[in-house]
Image (cartoon, rainbow, N blue to C red):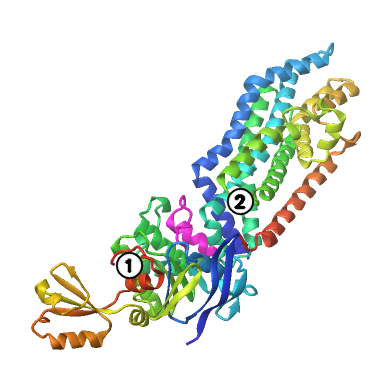
Amino acid sequence: MKKVIEIENLHKSFKDVHAVNGLSFSVEEGQLFAFLGVNGAGKSTTISVICGQLRADEGKVTVNGHDIEKNMNDVKRNLGVVFQNSVLDKSLSVIDNLKYRAGLYGISGEKFKKRLEELCALLQLSPVLKRTLGKLSGGQKRRVDIARALIHKPKILILDEPTTGLDPQTRKLIWDVINSLRKDDGVTVLLTTHYMEEAADADYVVIIDGGSIVAEGTPLELKNQYTGDFITVYGVEEEKVKELNVKYEAIAGGFRISVTDISEATNLIVNNPRLFTDYEVIKGKMDDVFLAVTGKKLGGGML
Amino acid sequence: MISELLSSIKRNCKVYFKDKGMFFSSLITPIILLVLYVFFLSKVFKDSFVSSLGEVSCPDKLINGMVAGQLCSSLLAVCCITVAFCSNMIMVNDKVTGARNDLLITPASRWVHAIGYYVSTAVTTVIVCGVAGVGSLIYIACSGWYLSVGDVFLLLADIVLLSMFGTALSSVINFFLSTQGQMSAVGTAVSAGYGFVCGAYMPISFFGKTLQNILGFLPGTYGTSLVRQHAMNGTFREMISMGWDDSVISEIRDSVDANLYFFGNKVEIWVSYLVLILSIVLLIAVYVLLNMFCGKKKNK
C-alpha cells in the first residue's frame, strides 16, 4: 500500500511544554487511521503540523510524497480538514460559506453548483442551504464543516474530533459519510476521537500519551496485546461462578468473567457445560486497551 | 489567482456588512463627530474666525460656509482612518475564531488573503466614509455652498485616497494583533490620538515649530490638508472675487492648514498627493511582505 502521510521523529515544543516527542508513524492510502489520546496528548499539535499551520522543531512530514516544508502548496490541494471547532462564518449563510471557500480553490460557477449538489446529497444539506450558519444546530454545523472540507474533493481527510458533542443520529450520518467516501472515492481518513467505539472501526490505531506513541496496531492486535477476553454468562447463581476460581464481576442479569485469551475461555466452557448454557464470549474493548496502555480513561459513550 | 482574490474580497465584504455590530460601530464615528462639531464646535470655530478678521467685513454665508468646510474636512480626515481600523477588525476576528487557519489551508497564497483583507477593508471604509462625505456636503450646502463640481470630485477622491491610506496603516498595525482586547486598545488609541497628530482636531499651525516639523513627517497630515483645501476652496475663491487682499486670504489659509509647510517651505498640492500615494504603496508593500514572511508558520 502507498503511504500517503509519513511522519518521522516529529518534535514540537511550546516553551517548556513538549507537546510532541519524537512521533513517527505512517498512514496508508484508503486507510481509516485513528489517533487516540487524552486532551493535551499532542493530537491536535500533530495535525496542525501536517496542515502546515505549525512548524515542527524537528522531524520530517511528507504528504503524498511531498515534504510539507518544501511543497506545502501541492499538499494543500489534496488535504481536507475538519477542525475541532467550527471555523466557518457564523453571520453568513451555508451556501455563502461554501461558495467563498470553494472560490479559494478556484471552484466557481457551474463547477461549484455541481459540487454543491453532490455535497447536499451526501450530507443532507439542502434544507439548511440558505440559513445563517450561526442559527444552525451543532449537528447541522458539523455537516457544513465536513462539506467545506470536501468541497475540493481532497484525497486525504483529516477529522479532529468530528463527532464530539453530537447526537447519535448525526454521528451515525457522519460515519456513513466517512465510510462512503472511503468506499466510493478511496479517501484516506485520519481521525482523532474521544470515542473508543469509533476507534474500534479503524484500520489502524495509534495511541499517544505525553506526545509519544505508547501503543499502535490494528484494533484486534491492540485488544489481543493489551486486554484479555470476557465470557458473559447469564441466568446463573453467583455461588456457581465463584466455584470456577476466576476473576469476575456482576453485571445486569449475569456475570462477566475475565479470561486471558480465547483458549482459556474454550476450556472453561467445555469443562463446565452445565454452567455455560446462556453465554457470550467478547473481546476486550478499546477502552480497556486505552486504560491498559495509558493508565487513563477516555471520555465517550456508545454510538 | 484572480478568482481566489475575488472570492476572498467578496467574503470579507459580506462578513462586514452582515455583522451589524461591526458596521454600526464603523458608522458611529462619523455620526458622533458630526454631532459634536455641529452642536459644540461650530460656534467656537465661527467666533474664532470672525475675531481673526478684525475690521474686514464678511457675509454670514461665507463665514458659515468656511466654518462648515473646516469642520467637515476635519471630520472626514479622522473618519477615513478610524473607520478603516474598525473595518479591518475582520482580519483580527479571523485569528480569534480560527477562520484564519481554515483559510490558510487552502491553496490560495498568503498575499491573496492579505490583499483580500486590504481591498475589502478599503471598499467598506470608502462606502462608510463616502456616506459621511455626502452628509458633510449636505451640511456645507445648508451652511453656505461655494464648492465647484471639481472641488466635490477632488474631495471625494481625497476620501478614497485617505481611506486607502487608513486601510494600509491599519493593515500593518493589525497584522500584529491577535485578540479582541488588543484590537479595542488600538482602536481607542487611534480614535483618541489620530485627530490631533493629523491636524484635524486642531490646525497644525497652532502648534509650536518643532512639533509642526515633526508632524510634517506623518503622511496623514498631508491627507488632512488635501481634504481641507478642497472643502474650503470655494470660500477662498469667493474671497478673491470679493476683492480681499491676497495676504489676508493667505493668512487664513495658513491658519487652517489649507497651506501646509514642511520646515518652512510651502508644500504644493501635487507633493501632498505624492506623499500620500507613496505612503499607501509603501505600507501595502510592508503589509504584504509581513504576511508572506513573518506569519508564514507559527513557531509558538
B208 left or right of A154 in image: right
Reading the image, the residue beneath label 1 is A173
> Residue at the top extreme?
B55
Q: Amino acid at mark 2?
A: Ser
Reading the image, the residue beneath label 2 is B120
Q: Nearer the viewer, residue B239 or B259?
A: B259
| Chain that bears disc 1 | A
The answer to whether residue B184 is above or below residue A59 is above
A234 left or right of B148 in image: left
Query: Does any portion of residue A106 appear in the rendered image?
Result: no
Residue segment shown in magenta: A83-108
Count how many numbered circles sit on residues in the image. 2
Q: Answer few, some or many: residues within 10 Å of disc 1's Cα (few below 14, many 20 plus, some between 14 and 19).
A: some
The answer to whether residue A267 is above or below residue A26 is below
Residue at (74% x, 24% y) in the render: B66
Q: Amino acid at mark 1?
A: Leu
SS label for mark 2: helix
Query: Whole-Å distance between the Cαs marked 1 and 2?
Result: 37 Å
B290 left or right of A177 in image: right
Assign the magenta stretch its main secondary structure.
Answer: loop
